[in-house]
Amino acid sequence: MSAKNKVVASCVRPMVAALHAYVPGEQPKVRGLIKLNTNENPYPPAPAVLKATLAAVDGRLRLYPNPTSSGLRAKLAAMHECGPENIFIGNGSDEVLAYLIRAFVEPVASVAAGSSKAKVQYLWPCYSLYPVLAETHGARPVAVPLEGDFSLPTVPALRRGGQWDFDAALSLVTTPNAPSGRGYTTAELDTLCRAQKGMLVLDEAYVDFAEQDALVLARKHPHVVVTRTFSKAFSLCFQRVGYAVAHADVVAALDKVRDSYNVNGLGQIAAEATLDALPYYQKNFARIIKTRERLRRELTGLGWKVLPSQTNFLLAEPPGAPAKEWLERLRAKKILVRWFSLPEIQKYLRITIGTDAEVDALLKVVR
Ligand SMILES: *Cc1c(COP(=O)(O)O)cnc(C)c1O
């Protein structure tokens, strides 16, 4: 390490030095890999979305974008039967989650020891970004386990367990769940909403592949926020657009703590065009669900234990060898899937649903 870097190291906050940053799935540089590792949509954006985005690439790039994403918020409000004051747009839903913590959670150092006001709690396993966002904010991350089959603990079970804090500043539920793919009913989520006193975030990144959604709960309970993204279902990861549906007071609080131009202009345009092309995407949801169920049947027939999924991926336990070894063997055959070293899920591989041809290539290698 150079002398200069030693100076930097001594200046970096200890919290940052100790932080275990989020590890994104690999975006390979080599060509020809079948990419089933980051839950991207295998189908391209609608032609009209590409056209609208391309048409916006001109001298206007020198201007700042619409600071409040007003066009996009109006369209989302119409779609979700609420007002634009109930919609908050972020640079991906990741950013929305970070702002929720910024707006609703106290850093540990500014409240009494053990205070609920500094707690970010989540039912675990779930999206592994949550603890990173909590740590970065100086809040206290608290993981409370889901049931062994990844189902939601009931409210009485949460009370009995004693770990779940009904007053926590902010609680998060990934629904449908990632990494398991398990779906939850609106009714069981509503029971949790009614018991919870602090803010409750329902992260619906995969909801378009599920049987039920919980949007009605964000419209009904002022302390409940539903987050969604254009990334997974709407083939728009590259553009980074996500949003929250929430009470107007929640949106107002988020608006105070966000960057003034947090959503880039081309992203706003692409997302608006997406909402004008919904039938194209709905066809893709149906195709992905169909491919998902076929892959599940075929892998099961080959001796894999595959969990039921309401997302665009499967969590599956391969036979014969440890999952990590399968990961490496599949990669050698140019198929990229995801494996997590977390004890709760290390016996599984997470496989994103690709096109039928990609899934056939996977099955060929597996056989
Ligand atoms: C992918 C994902 C997100 C983030 O989506 P972006 O909008 O791309 O930031 C949020 N939550 C879950 C559970 C996800 O899987």
Image (spheres, helix red, strand yellow):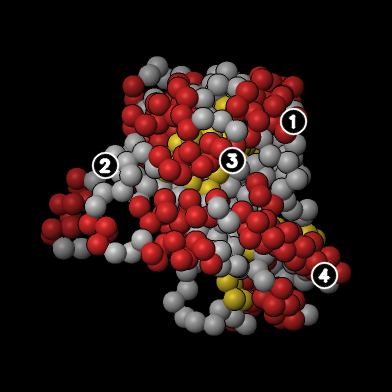
What amino acid is found at the position of numbered circle 3 in the picture? Answer: Met
Q: In the depicted view, which residue is nearer to us: 243 or 47?
A: 47
Residue found at the very far right of the displayed protein = 301
Establish if 189 lies above or below 271.
Answer: above
In the image, what residue occupies the spot 71% across and 73% down? 356
Kindly report which numbered mark, 2 or 1, lies closer to the viewer in this rendering: 1
Residue 138 location in percent, x, y? 37, 33
Label 2 vs label 4: CA separation? 50 Å
Residue 45 location in percent, x, y? 54, 64
Image quarter where the N terminus lies is bottom left
> Does the beta carbon at disc 2 come under 8 Å from ligand 1?
no
Residue found at the very far left of the displayed protein = 3
Kindly report which numbered mark, 1 or 3, lies closer to the viewer in this rendering: 3
Mark 4 = which residue?
298
Residue 165 location in percent, x, y? 58, 23
What amino acid is found at the position of numbered circle 1 in the picture? Answer: Glu
**Can residue 70 be seen at all in this image of the molecule?**
yes
What amino acid is found at the position of numbered circle 2 in the picture? Answer: Arg
Please tell me in which quadrant of the rendered image residue 123 appears.
top right
Q: Could you tell which of marks 4 and 3 lies nearer the N-terminus?
A: 3
Mark 3 = which residue?
79
Mark 2 = which residue?
13
Image quarter where the C terminus lies is bottom right
Label 1 vs label 3: CA separation? 24 Å
Q: Could you tell which of marks 1 and 4 lies nearer the N-terminus?
A: 1
Label 2 vs label 1: CA separation? 41 Å
Mark 1 = which residue?
188
Mark 2 Cα shell of 10 Å, populated few (<14), some (14-19), many (≥20): few
Q: Could you tell which of marks 1 and 3 lies nearer the N-terminus?
A: 3
